[in-house]
Structure formats: C-alpha cells, structure tokens
C-alpha cells in the first residue's frame, strides 16, 4: 500500500462496549495493523481505561481521536483530526477526515493519510449516505495531482465485496466500523475482512511478478492510473 500503509483500518465503536479492550487485542493478534480509538461522547479518563487494558505492543498500533492530552501518556501510533479540528503537531502519524471532495483536493496540510466519506450508505448511521457520486471520485483519482496527495481511505458503508473496486478506483484502503461492530462476533467479522485483504494482496503479488522492473508498490500504483 502507499508508503507502507495498511489496506484495512478499524475504527472503534463510538460507544463503550463490554470486553472491548479484550476484543481489540484479539483483533491485533489476528492481523489488524491499525486501530482508530474514537469515543466522541466519552471523557479522556474513560478512553484511558481502554488503553490501560491493552499491552504496549497493541497501543503502538492505536491512533487516537480527540483527547490529545493522552498523547503524552501512551506510546500511540498517531493522532487523527476531525474535519474541523485544528491540526496539532504529534509524534507518529497525522491524519484527518474529509467529507467534501473540494476540501480533500485543496488540502495543503502534511498528512500521512486521510479518510474520505461516506462513499456508500452508512451501516452504523441510518440515513447517512454519500454526497459525492462515484464518477467524481474516479475523476479525482485520475488527476495527476492526486498522486502526490496523502493516502486516502474510503469510509462509510464498507463491506468486503466493495474493497477491490475501491482499491482499483484509487483509494489506498478502507476504514471500517459498522460492518464489524454491528455484528454479534466482531472479532470473527474483522477476520473476514482480513481474509479478503490477504486474498487481494496475494493476487497483486502474483500479478506484480509479471510487471518487469517494477517493485510491488510501483505495481500497485500502476493499477490506479
């Protein structure tokens, strides 16, 4: 993926869940590479309780939303800014959400990656659907200047069968929420996504062997031209 970015990012449920830290640790053990901890209606103290239950090796793969004061207390992977939040300087990755295509296209901030969505009808938020047609997204990724922009992850209504098409369009990967936390067994649901990721990566590696003189990342980029 672009700059070594993972294909899948999991965002936490906005609500506190029973045995949440335990489930997240299991997900990391299953192969999850990046987890966004987002609890917009909960205090820093409540969010810290989740982090306190995770081993350090897992915390290093967690990106925090809001509660920037916790960055000094934990070895987190980075910080994610909301679409309206003023950017802060952090160690680790710096990312942001975008909900309007012009804002993404005009972005001048130095970001490691961005979320854009919703691209489909949201699973977790009823009535929250896309405001940008797929044709506009295709046009955006077809522009030469899009190649120099941060990695962009599709957000909203992401299901396993949608991943391949989004990657071919130009997205670096997908950010998932409702398709995992809306299931009775979220760990098993995530493992289903990870299997799709493995299948796509295996297929791309096979195809890349036929791309003379190209590295695997270069081959991936060639698919998006």
Image: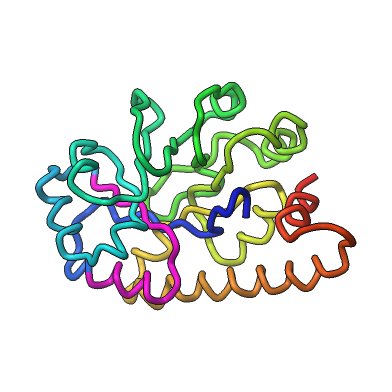
Determine the residue positioned at 12% across, 56% down: 49
Camera-nearest residue between 34 and 77: 77
Task: Based on the picture, tell me whether residue 88 belongs to the magenta stretch.
Answer: no
- How many numbered marks, from 0 up? 0
The quadrant in which residue 138 appears is: top right
129 with respect to 215 (left or right) = left
Span of residues in magenta: 22-39
- Where is 30 relative to 18, above or below? below
Compared to residue 5, the image places residue 138 above or below, namely above
Of residues 93 and 27, the one nearer the viewer is: 93
State the colouring used for the structure image.
Answer: rainbow
Residue 16 in the image: state x and y as whole percent.
Answer: 18, 57
- The image quadrant that residue 33 belongs to is bottom left
Q: Nearer the viewer, residue 67 or 142?
A: 67
The residue shown at (80%, 65%) is 208
- Residue 53 appears at what percent x and percent y? 16, 65
Tell me if residue 37 is in the magenta stretch: yes
Q: Residue at x 78, y 73 (%)?
A: 206
Direction from residue 36 to residue 47 in the image, left or right: left
Drawn side of residue 70 relative to residue 23, left or right:
left
Residue at the spot 40% in from the left edge and 78% down from the top edge? 188
Residue 225 image position (x, y, % from top left): 80, 44
Quadrant occupied by the N terminus: bottom right
Task: Choose between 208 and 14: the one closer to the eye.
Answer: 208
The percent coordinates of residue 215 (x first, y second) are: 77, 58
């Amino acid at each position: 993926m672009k700059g070594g970015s993972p294909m899948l990012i999991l965002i936490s449920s906005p609500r506190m869940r029973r045995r949440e830290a335990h489930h997240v640790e299991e997900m990391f053990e299953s192969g999850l590479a990046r987890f966004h901890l987002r609890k917009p209606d909960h205090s820093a103290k409540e969010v810290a309780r989740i982090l306190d239950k995770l081993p350090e090796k897992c915390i290093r793969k967690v990106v925090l939303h809001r509660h920037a004061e916790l960055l000094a207390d934990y070895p987190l992977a980075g910080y994610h800014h909301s679409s309206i939040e003023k950017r802060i300087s952090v160690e680790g990755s710096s990312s942001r959400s975008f909900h309007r295509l012009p804002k993404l296209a005009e972005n001048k901030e130095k970001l490691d990656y961005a979320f854009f969505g919703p691209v489909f009808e949201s699973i977790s938020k009823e009535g929250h659907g896309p405001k940008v047609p797929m044709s506009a997204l295709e046009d955006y990724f077809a522009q030469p200047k899009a190649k120099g922009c941060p990695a962009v992850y599709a957000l909203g209504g992401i299901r396993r069968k949608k991943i391949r098409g989004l990657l071919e369009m130009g997205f670096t990967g997908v950010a998932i929420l409702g398709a995992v936390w809306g299931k009775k067994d979220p760990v098993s649901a995530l493992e289903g996504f990870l299997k799709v990721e493995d299948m796509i990566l295996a297929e791309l590696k096979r195809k890349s062997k036929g791309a003379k003189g190209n590295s695997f990342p270069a081959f991936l980029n060639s698919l998006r031209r």
